[in-house]
Image (cartoon, rainbow, N blue to C red):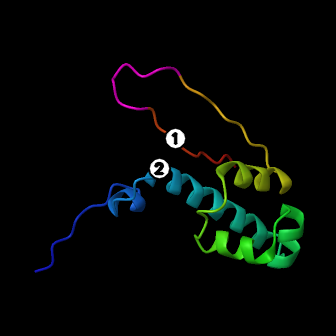
Amino acid sequence: MIDIETGSGNVYADLGSADADEMLVKAQLATKIGEIIKSRNWSQQQAAEVLGMTQPKLSKMLRGQFRGISESKMLDCLTRLGRDVQIVVGPARRSTTAGRVAVVFRV
């Protein structure tokens, strides 16, 4: 019999990554950037020019290798693709645990 463990919803946390929340946010942003590029039928070279980065760097980001790319750069990519980006800071939590970061995409 195989033991199956339910994931937390964050594969990076499940794998024990110290920066799991940041990596999940970057993965979600990279996924959205890739979806927009695909929907426009752009080549990576075309997209890289619009996004202000090299094609190899864009390729790495879209393949999940985004450690050298800041969240700020990824948000800039979304605005260059014509998307509005809002950062909302919620009220303080009552508990002593740290706050959380979440990415929400509106249609």
> Are the residues flagged by discs 2 and 1 in contact, CB closer than 8 Å?
yes
**Amino acid under label 2?**
Asp
**Quick one: which residue is furthest to the front in this view?**
68
Q: Residue at x 52, y 40 (%)?
A: 101
Magenta stretch, residue numbers: 91-98
Q: Residue at x 58, y 63 (%)?
A: 67
Task: From the top left corner, tell me how far across and down residue 12 is, in percent.
Answer: 41, 60
- Mark 2 lies on a secondary structure that is helix
Query: What is the number of the mark on residue 21?
Result: 2
The mark that comes first in sequence, 2 or 1, is 2
Task: From the top left corner, tell me how far across and down residue 104 is, in percent.
Answer: 60, 45
Height in image: 28 above or below 1? above
Height in image: 53 above or below 102? below
- Mark 1 lies on a secondary structure that is loop
Q: Quadrant of the N terminus?
A: bottom left
Nearer to the camera, 82 or 45: 45
**Amino acid under label 1?**
Val
Q: Residue at x 33, y 23 (%)?
A: 95
Compared across the picture, whether 2 is left or right of 37 comes to: left
Compared across the picture, whether 70 is left or right of 1 comes to: right
Nearer to the camera, 73 or 107: 73
Secondary structure predominantly adopted by residues drawn in magenta? loop
Compared across the picture, whether 90 is left or right of 69 comes to: left
Mark 1 neighbour density, 10 Å: few (under 14) some (14–19) many (20 or more): few
Q: What residue is disc 1 on? A: 101
Task: From the top left corner, tell me how far across and down residue 59 is, in percent.
Answer: 70, 76
Instruction: Measure the alpha-carbon separation of dots 2 and 1.
Output: 7 Å
Height in image: 17 above or below 43? above
Compared across the picture, whether 68 is left or right of 43 comes to: left
Q: How many marks?
A: 2
